[in-house]
Image (cartoon, helix red, strand yellow):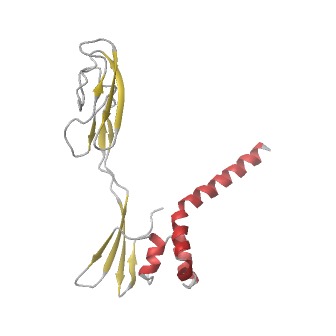
Amino acid sequence: MSRIFSVALLGTLAIALSAGCASSQMSRIDRNRDVYETWPIEVRQAVLDGKVEPGMTPEMVEVTWGRPTEIVTQGGTGDEVWVYQSGGSDGSVMYPGGGVYPGGRSGYPGGVYGGGYPSNRPSIGIGVGSGGGVGIGGGMGGGGMGYPGGGMGYPGGMGGSAIVTPPTPPDIKEVVFRNGVVHRADKPTP
């Protein structure tokens, strides 16, 4: 009985997860239901699968992938390129005792260090950086003097070693239109 329940629960979870991923796709189809229903069955299936195929119109592409991030017109060929960009980050370095160093920036943002100076009491360092990260850590000794925006502070403010988040490139897809229809399109990311 419990094995059947587990299999049923896993199946329900898989359906719910796949439905959650397609919710924005379905909402775009629902908003354009009147025109969607007039398209050939192959086009409707491609739109439903999130695939942009050669021969599609801009309206079909917009229902499939949404509005592009950028539209570039190529003068010599007359092609129009729709660029879709998502994700990506600059990366960051966080010191758990306070202070966050966003990628590519300098300075020591954030940092409140308790415990007084000099002191051998435990201290806690908390830092909020301009990159949006928050660092919290503790240590023995010193504790810092509580300078506003103090960064690393005195011994005791560091709660551990640096946590590095490397930069990640954005996901970029392109659709090239020639004479008003899709000439070439990148494959969707899974």
Q: Is residue 2 visible?
A: yes
Q: Which residue ends up furthest to the left in the rendered image?
A: 106
Quarter of the image where one finds residue 76: bottom left
User: In the rendered image of this protein, does residue 66 appear above or below residue 21?
Assistant: below
Q: Is residue 53 visible?
A: no
- Left or right: 11 with respect to 171? right
User: In the rendered image of this protein, does residue 16 appear above or below residue 96?
Assistant: below
User: In the rendered image of this protein, does residue 21 appear above or below residue 162?
Assistant: below
Q: Which residue ends up furthest to the bottom in the rendered image?
A: 179
Residue 107 in the image, given as x and y percentages of width and height: 19, 38
Task: Report the residue at 37% width, 86% height from top.
Answer: 180
Quarter of the image where one finds residue 171: bottom left
Task: Report the residue at 23% width, 30% height from top.
Answer: 148
Residue 187 in the image, given as x and y percentages of width and height: 43, 69
Q: What is the tally of numbered marks visible in this picture?
A: 0
Residue 172 or residue 122, whichever sits in front: 122
- Left or right: 153 with respect to 65? left
Quick one: quadrant of the N terminus? top right
Q: Which residue ends up furthest to the front in the rendered image?
A: 148
Residue 162 in the image, given as x and y percentages of width and height: 31, 33
Task: Report the residue at 63% width, 58% height from top.
Answer: 15
Task: Report the residue at 28% width, 30% height from top.
Answer: 111
- Left or right: 166 with respect to 39? left
Residue 29 or residue 171, whichever sits in front: 29
User: In the rendered image of this protein, does residue 163 appear above or below residue 61?
Assistant: above
